[in-house]
Image: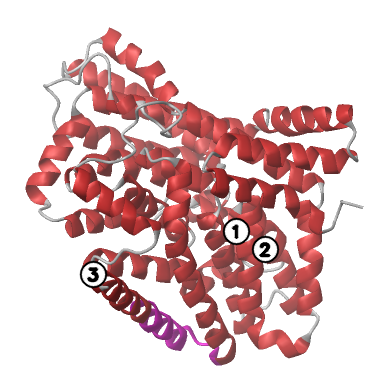
Amino acid sequence: MFVNSFWALVPAIIAIALALITKEVYSSLFVGIVVGGLLYSGFSFTGTIEHVFVDGMIAQLSDAWNVGILIFLVVLGSIVMLMNRAGGSAAFGRFAVAHVKTAAGAKIATIFLGVLIFIDDYFNCLTVGSVMRPLTDKHKISREKLAYLIDATAAPVCIIAPISSWAAAVTGFVDGANGLTLFVRAIPYNFYAILTIVMMFALAITGVDYGPMKLAEMNAMLNGKNEDKPSSAHSSMTGAEDQPHPPVSEKGKVIHLVLPIVVLIISCVIGMIYTGGFFEGETFIDAFSNSDASVGLVYGSVVALIITVIFMIITKVLSFNECMNAIPEGFKSMVPAILILTFAWTLKAMTDSLGAKEYVASQVELIAGNHALMSILPAIVFLIGTFLAFATGTSWGTFGILIPIVVNVFGADLSNELMIIAISACMAGAVCGDHCSPISDTTIMASAGAQCNHIKHVSTQLPYALTAAGVSFVTYIVAGFVRNWMVSIPVGIILMIGCIYVIKALEGKKAEA
């Protein structure tokens, strides 16, 4: 009764609704998990317990990919803690404040750094957050705005970068055609990703804010500090870094932040192509396409941690004992993010066991069977992808469901422009839903990277993401009929900038009233 039906999405919908209502994510996710277990077991007590903990939580925590991501988080937390304890973050903050004079400049610098780190979304979130927090704090930019900028330059940038873990994932879901060629062809039609980047620059340049984000920005500006400077582990995603014990070294320089980050980037890239067979004769592109991002990030981060410890000791900013004490502190700073990720993965396991994928696939195929809807099918696929990713918290899972369906509907014909547009709509919808969802791992990572309360991050960025989604939906309708990206993209950009200026005018009228 509950399997392969709309009921499969109910646990996720309940979890998301509770999180937004109660502003508390742990209990909301757990309630959604329990509801999923009850529906799957037919309301059997023992069946629910077994499904939730054995088939759900334990299975997710024993999954090799998930364990790799958790190890990467822990190691990255330790590297960030070492940079902070060494005084590298503080030194970079002083350097950045001396060279970046305005809040708009700080936002634009954050966006540029996010765009540059396109290898992987997890890596992007935590790296950009640790580097840019000192700068945005100095310019009284709220942690909520920082979290939005991080989140909006993570998945949306990775999904239009041919050399990224996301490109590798997408190409793996395409049968009967060259997946990487298809990915590259789809980039100009990935309107949500492109328009989100346009929107970020427009917001930074114009200084426009609206919805809950406007209040967060006003609080940060008026109070001279961020609301989410942690007073407790419950109120902040990660808090240990702001109150380090022992104190931050006064010997730290910018190099004590820059070198670990550069080493991390290089070693993670090498780790990923190593898992893809680059050193066994594969080309760089093929190695990236075949890479195991989870394992590659573990290799890279561990190497970076070792080099960072050696560098801190050689430069005498930290002793060996101080480095060793910082490592478990870095672990502690990632515990809230790890807990939320564990619950989010378990909730996804519940919806998967209830047949969420099969239910959505049947609905998409039903719509695709109506040939009269073909020209607006990309826009419909975009909406379905957004809803599915929002409800399940996974963009990669959404790719796996929708991309094979679109390929079956249109055929693996790269000369069919409408098929390219529809594939891109799958990816854009998945990223959009992932961007909005409080149970998305990328959203969780953005909160952790910015050290921002997770629910505040979700509620403040949601109006921004929905604005970009609305403009993208209209642009997909245009693209379905004109089938030319050189026409569609300018239309979308004009609409996006127009929306920002309309919002600016409306906010101005509100201020006058």
Q: Quadrant of residue 24?
A: top right
Q: For the residue marked with disc 3, what is the amino acid?
A: Thr
**Tag 2 near tag 1, CB within 8 Å:** yes
Q: Which residue is mark 1?
A: 170
Q: Which secondary structure lies at badge 3?
A: helix
- Whether label 3 touches label 1, CB < 8 Å: no
Residues rendered magenta in the picture:
482-497
Q: Secondary structure at mark 1?
A: helix
Could you give the CA–CA distance between mark 3 and mark 1, rounded to whole angstroms?
35 Å
Q: Which residue is mark 2?
A: 174
Numbered disc 2: secondary structure:
loop
Tell me the amino acid under the disc marked 1. Answer: Val
In this orientation, which residue lies closer to the viewer: 230 or 440?
230
Question: Which residue, as the protein is rendered here, is positioned at the far left?
Answer: 98
Q: Where does label 3 land, which residue?
A: 206
Q: Residues within 10 Å of mark 1 (few under 14, many from 20)?
A: many
Q: Residue at x 16, y 39 (%)?
A: 93
